[in-house]
Image (cartoon, rainbow, N blue to C red):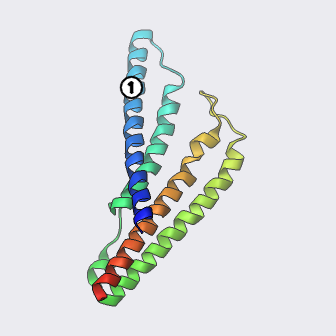
Amino acid sequence: MKIILSVSNLLDTIIKKIISVLLMIMTVVLFSQVIARHVMGTGLSWSEELVRYMCVWIIFLGATCAAKDGSQVSVTALDEILNGLPKKLLGIIQSILASTYCVLLSWIGFGALEFAKLQKSPNMMIPMNIVYSVIPIAMIIMLIHLVTIFLQNYIIAKEVHE
């Protein structure tokens, strides 16, 4: 349990640093784009594309952080109504559904990489599988976080009953 928890925490720390760097790069690129338009009268052809792809990466990586700390958007009506065993069963069902979603989206993401490697981005001419690779990467990281949370909840619940 300690190993998966430390892996989950390490991944979360790394992802937050990556997001910070991507946000800084986005800021510099967008600022450069504005300056280029005002000074040269024309923008940088690649800047908006780069910022768009970085934004996609930030969204998917940010979703892993939200899964880690439980801050993702959710409907809590049943959580607030239920108590005891039904609430625990609901939590287990939610964990199974979320994990299944991550596995499914990761599998679909890996499949999409095969098609995306044949495409290049219009302005930067980078392979699109680099852009799309965030989908399976983020889903695998999110799955690690979800499994960690599930194990923590199960072990805590087991220790409370003992």
Quarter of the figure with the C terminus: bottom left
Tag 1: Cα neighbours inside 10 Å, few (<14), some, or many (≥20)? few
Q: Is residue 83 left or right of residue 89?
A: left
Q: Is residue 140 visible?
A: yes
Q: Is residue 51 left or right of residue 115?
A: left
Given residues 116 and 61, the one toward you in this image is: 61
Work out whether 133 lies above or below 83. above
SS for tag 1?
helix
| Count of numbered badges drawn on the protein | 1
Q: Position of residue 146 (x, y in %)?
A: 44, 66
Please name the residue shown 43% across and 55% down the image: 64
Q: Position of residue 65 (x, y in %)?
A: 38, 54
Please name the residue shown 43% across and 75% down the image: 94
Q: Position of residue 7 (x, y in %)?
A: 44, 57
Q: Quadrant of residue 159?
A: bottom left
| Residue type of the residue flagged with mark 1 | Val
Q: Position of residue 136 (x, y in %)?
A: 57, 54
Please name the residue shown 62% across and 34% down the image: 121
Q: Which residue is mark 1?
A: 28
Quarter of the figure with the N terminus: bottom left
Q: Residue furthest front?
A: 2
Please name the residue shown 44% across and 63% down the image: 4
Q: Is residue 83 visible?
A: no
Given residues 10 and 49, the one toward you in this image is: 10
